[in-house]
């Protein structure tokens, strides 16, 4: 099947060789940014080789966080990098998995649409891949397609075959292959070794793909003769061997690629005319503030996957962006919620931090630790930011310790009389796990005079959700009269989206995931406001900390106690 495409859309495929974790996602996002800054319209797609339909059912320990798009797709975390860098929202169609491809083809087969033919990987699976690769045809000047996995993996072969065919159909002037490889330095030999790169390119060529550009990850600058050797043996132009040296921060990568002229080579090879060299002024200032910040705060991050930081990728990036806005380095102290089993343990874990984030999550494990941590920061006036489950834990804590509903809990963990968090009515009869939560972007109305309103400076906002449980309206009045302020609510007033405590320096929980909308330059209003509060807290308490010789921070909270519900 020849795929009909408009010649004007240019396609860039990004493959990876030698080993995984070389930064294909960051490379794609960085190149996307450089091309966008040249005045081109750009989108980035990710093709993942796994058979899961999406990441929604995958364990974050294995696969990292589940990134949610505006239209409610549960995707790979690389999609988050794309949005943070190019600052253009991606959609469900930007994230494709082998599972989706097979699902579609098998459904079609069941409907008899293949008219009795034998359904095969080539051409039926590859045709479906090509159909999806050209989804954005005519809608963007450039479509970058990151192919997940490493060249040589059995699973990714159909993607490579589809990319090869597409390149043949569209012509080499409209398609470009960038291969990311690794050039290791072998200490005992005192040399950089190019053989792994040669082998991975050879493997790519076995699939009929000749890379146009090689991006070589290496720890130090390569001498000219090594670059020449790579170019000669891998059959690429010498100036198309681009080095990717380790960067201090991922946000420096676009600047390094721009210096290495990656975008120049791309536009030249794709015959894209009349573009301007990107200035990256604002981006450069942002990177400078990350590299040389004026201030520093420590944020305690309370979660159950703290050994697996990819599980919270977007939150950590959002903290970094908000730090840059506040000219502040955000040092993250990981606090395993399962280790917090007593009030003393909470106090110990939180001491020395200037604010805590309580993470999203599923299941009862670690929840009691989160609740103890929240009690401590509420009572000791330490800035608190609860996200999704973090907000739900704050509601439970308030119900238990301020309203005296001692056994209050979420219906997710225990069926009790006071399920202050409970299943949403439209979730009650759902049994399937994949794609069935409240997902994607929803509007939320903010109440004037609250911290949320102050941060957003807007009456209505849109944020992304991923949850099944919700604030139980049966307890709204009771909690509100005890001092909890509902500062964000769905337009029909049915769903509580943000809660806060007015007499606390900064205590806010949101049912949505603000981290998914934090962009590199500018950050996200709630994160920016939270870091600002943490900075103020740091300045107020640093004196005490020195006096206390870094022991437990003992602060006089009595004067505030009545305001926070004691
Ligand atoms: N487990 C909770 C729910 O389903 C919270 C989900 C989350 O933190 N993303 O409502």
Image (cartoon, helix red, strand yellow):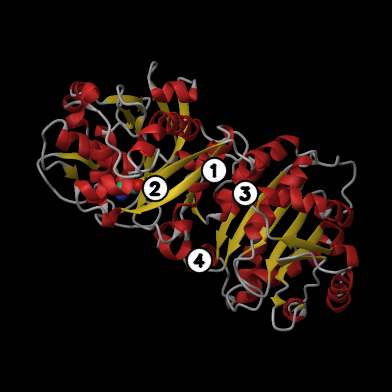
> How packed is label 1: few (under 14 Cα within 10 Å), some, or many (20 or more)?
many
Secondary structure category for the residue under label 2: strand
Q: Which mark is residue 82?
A: 3
Q: Is mark 4 within 8 Å of ligand 1?
A: no
| 382 left or right, relative to 256 | left
> How packed is label 3: few (under 14 Cα within 10 Å), some, or many (20 or more)?
many
State the CA–CA distance, disc 4 to disc 1.
34 Å
State the CA–CA distance, disc 3 to disc 4.
22 Å
Query: Which residue sits at x=77%, y=46%?
Result: 35
Q: Which mark is residue 13?
A: none
Picture coordinates of residue 429, whole percent (x, y): 25, 50
Q: Nearer the viewer, mark 2 or mark 3?
A: 2
Q: Nearer the viewer, mark 3 or mark 4?
A: 3
- Residue 493 in view here: yes
> How packed is label 2: few (under 14 Cα within 10 Å), some, or many (20 or more)?
many
The mark that comes first in sequence, 3 or 4, is 3
Instruction: Kindly check if marks 2 and 3 are in contact, taking CB atoms under 8 A apart as contact.
Output: no
State the CA–CA distance, disc 2 to disc 4.
34 Å
Instruction: Kindly check if marks 3 and 4 are in contact, taking CB atoms under 8 A apart as contact.
Output: no
Instruction: Kindly check if marks 4 and 1 are in contact, taking CB atoms under 8 A apart as contact.
Output: no
The mark that comes first in sequence, 1 or 3, is 3
Task: Name the residue carrying label 2.
Answer: 301
State the CA–CA distance, disc 1 to disc 3.
16 Å
Query: Which residue sits at x=58%, y=39%?
Result: 519
């Amino acid at each position: 099947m020849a795929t009909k495409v408009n010649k004007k859309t240019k396609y860039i495929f990004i493959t990876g060789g030698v080993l995984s974790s070389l930064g294909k996602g960051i490379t794609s996002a960085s190149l996307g940014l450089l091309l966008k800054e040249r005045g081109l319209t750009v989108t980035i797609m990710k093709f993942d080789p796994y058979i899961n339909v999406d990441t929604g059912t995958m364990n974050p320990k294995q696969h990292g966080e589940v990134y949610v798009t505006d239209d409610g797709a549960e995707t790979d975390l690389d999609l988050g990098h794309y949005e943070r860098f190019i600052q253009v929202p991606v959609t469900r169609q930007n994230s494709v998995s082998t599972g989706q491809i097979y699902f579609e083809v098998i459904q079609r087969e069941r409907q008899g649409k293949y008219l009795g033919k034998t359904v095969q990987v080539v051409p039926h699976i590859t045709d479906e891949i090509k159909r999806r690769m050209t989804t954005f045809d005519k809608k963007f000047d450039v479509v970058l397609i990151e192919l997940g996995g490493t060249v040589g993996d059995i699973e990714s072969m159909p993607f490579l075959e589809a990319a090869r065919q597409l390149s043949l159909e569209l012509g080499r002037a409209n398609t470009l292959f960038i291969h990311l490889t690794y050039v290791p330095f072998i200490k005992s030999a005192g040399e950089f070794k190019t053989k792994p790169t040669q082998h991975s390119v050879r493997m790519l060529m076995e699939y009929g793909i000749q890379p146009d550009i090689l991006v070589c990850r290496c720890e130090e600058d390569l001498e000219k003769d090594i670059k020449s050797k790579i170019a000669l043996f891998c059959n690429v132009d010498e100036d198309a061997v681009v080095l990717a040296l380790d960067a201090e921060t991922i946000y420096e990568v676009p600047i390094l690629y721009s210096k290495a002229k990656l975008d120049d080579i791309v536009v030249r090879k794709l015959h894209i005319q009349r573009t301007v060299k990107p200035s990256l002024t604002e981006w450069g200032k942002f990177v400078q503030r990350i590299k040389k910040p004026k201030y520093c705060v420590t944020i305690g991050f309370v979660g159950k996957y703290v050994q697996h930081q990819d599980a919270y990728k977007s939150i950590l990036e959002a903290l970094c962006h908000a730090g840059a806005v506040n000219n502040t380095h955000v040092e993250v102290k990981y606090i395993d919620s399962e280790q917090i089993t007593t009030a003393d343990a909470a106090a110990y874990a939180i001491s020395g931090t200037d604010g805590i984030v309580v993470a999203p999550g599923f299941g009862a494990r670690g929840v009691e630790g989160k609740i103890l941590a929240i009690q401590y920061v509420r009572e000791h006036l330490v800035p608190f930011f609860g996200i999704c489950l973090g907000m739900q834990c704050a509601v439970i804590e308030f119900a238990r310790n301020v309203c005296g509903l001692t056994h209050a809990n979420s219906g997710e963990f225990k069926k009790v009389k006071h399920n202050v968090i409970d299943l949403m009515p439209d979730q009650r009869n759902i049994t399937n796990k994949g794609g069935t939560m409240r997902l994607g972007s929803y509007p939320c109305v903010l109440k004037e005079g609250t911290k949320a309103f102050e941060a957003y400076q807007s009456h209505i906002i849109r944020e992304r959700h991923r949850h099944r449980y919700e604030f139980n309206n049966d307890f709204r009045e009771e909690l509100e009269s005890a001092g909890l302020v509902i500062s964000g609510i769905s337009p029909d007033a049915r769903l509580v989206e943000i809660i806060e405590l007015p007499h606390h320096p900064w205590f806010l929980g949101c049912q949505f995931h603000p981290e998914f909308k934090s962009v590199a330059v500018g950050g996200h209003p709630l994160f920016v406001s939270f870091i600002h509060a943490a900075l103020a807290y740091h300045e107020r308490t640093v004196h005490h900390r020195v006096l206390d010789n870094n022991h437990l921070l003992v602060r006089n909270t009595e004067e505030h106690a009545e305001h926070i519900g004691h």
